[in-house]
Image: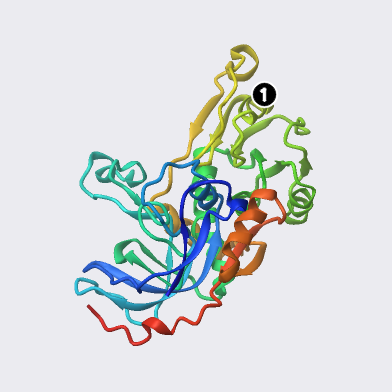
Amino acid sequence: MRAWAVTEPGPVEAGVLRLIERPVPVPGDDELLVHVRACGVCRTDLHVTEGDLPVHRPGVTPGHEVVGTVAGYGAGVSGFAVGDRVGVAWLRRTDGTCAYCLRGAENLCPRSEYTGWDADGGYTEYTTAPAAFAHRLPAGLDDVALAPLLCAGIIGYRALRRSSLPPGGRLGLYGFGGSAHLCAQVALAEGATVHVLTRGEAARRLALELGAASARDAYETPPEPLDSAILFAPAGELVPVALRALDRGGVLAVAGIHLSDTPPLDYEHELFYEKEVRSVTSNTRGDAREFLGLAARYGVRATTHTYPLSRASDALTDLKAGRFDGAAVLVNDFDGRAARGTPRG
């Protein structure tokens, strides 16, 4: 089968993501073999490719917003059948026994593993996933529409909850890419006033089309004080900007897995009056179930731009350059015959 692999982390435009041939993976006893139909393009994939995140698996295949069908499974798997449509997301596995897992915070598990970082992900024809971490997908949405929900949507939802937005509150979103434009739809559906602060004109237009009350440059001041803010852009210099925009008692949630250095904070003007800064670390499977249910109820839809899987490197390059709004999705244009008829076990 064909797969994209990070040969050596570096600038994506330098061609560090290479198309290679690999054997079709064999699922472990507790795993599914998934025939990839679509895979969303996430900024975390760019961080893995360029080395912003440390190498966990040399030559890894990125991608963790995978929509596919079950093509086989290990001897210990039950409840799935060949042909079932499933989603494979960022959180791949946890130990299930540590103090964090036992208290319902599996996203903090020290031995957690991640799709497209610790194990090969979805920029390929076939991938594997532990059955316990595969997601049942709602009917009524096609593969391309579903893919961004599996990370951008889930992480945006967790960030929204971490921001402690009060009912009917005023929310600021800094950056308006794949995750933010899905988060905004949930917040708006729940009665929030949403202000978007981002650099791209196309992103600002999309924000207004979705119902945002305002859309300004990331360094401008929103038209009213914010109860909560979420920083989606991986730019540490925006932390004090967002804090200054918060009202007294406001909360800033930082949603990215990678953030550039944060400048010194002015306590009096940026942190005083009981303002808070919170990070967001991955998600739990409970977050995923809640979000997918709300997405179906609220009619949350991703604005998508499709690329053939054979152009994955171009999609990441365009993401880095900010050439599209919403989210990019890779659609499998490879043949995929290699694993047809893959038996159970």
Query: Where's residue 6, x and y in %?
Result: 47, 55
Q: From the viewer's perspective, tell me whether residue 37 is left or right of residue 106.
A: right
What residue is shown with label 1?
A: 244
Q: Position of residue 53 (x, y in %)?
A: 46, 42
- Residue at 47% across, 65% down: 66
Rendered position, 77 above or below 268: below
Which residue is situated farthest in the top direction here?
268
Q: Which of the two residues, 247 or 316, is positioned nearer the viewer here?
A: 316
Image quarter where the C terminus lies is: bottom left
Question: Which of these two is toward me, 13 or 202?
Answer: 13
Give the colouring mode of the picture. rainbow
Q: How many numbered circles are shown? A: 1
Crowding around mark 1 (Cα neighbors within 10 Å: few <14, some 14 to 19, many 20+) is: many
Q: Where residue 213 appears, x then y in whole percent?
A: 76, 45
Residue 215: quadrant of the picture? top right
- Residue drawn at point x = 45 percent, y = 81 percent: 336
Asked if 257 appears above or below 123 in the picture, the reply is: above
Secondary structure found at label 1? helix
Establish if 327 lies above or below 8: below
Q: Is residue 195 left or right of residue 87?
A: right
Q: Is residue 300 visible?
A: no
**How far across and how far down the image is residue 315, in percent?**
62, 60
Identity of the amino acid at label 1? Answer: Arg
Residue at position x 63%, y 68% in the image: 307
Q: Evaluate whether residue 21 shows in this view.
A: yes
Say whether residue 19 is left or right of residue 185: left
Residue at 38%, 52% (x, y): give it.
58
Q: Quadrant of the N terminus?
A: bottom left
Q: Nearer the viewer, residue 221 or 29?
A: 29
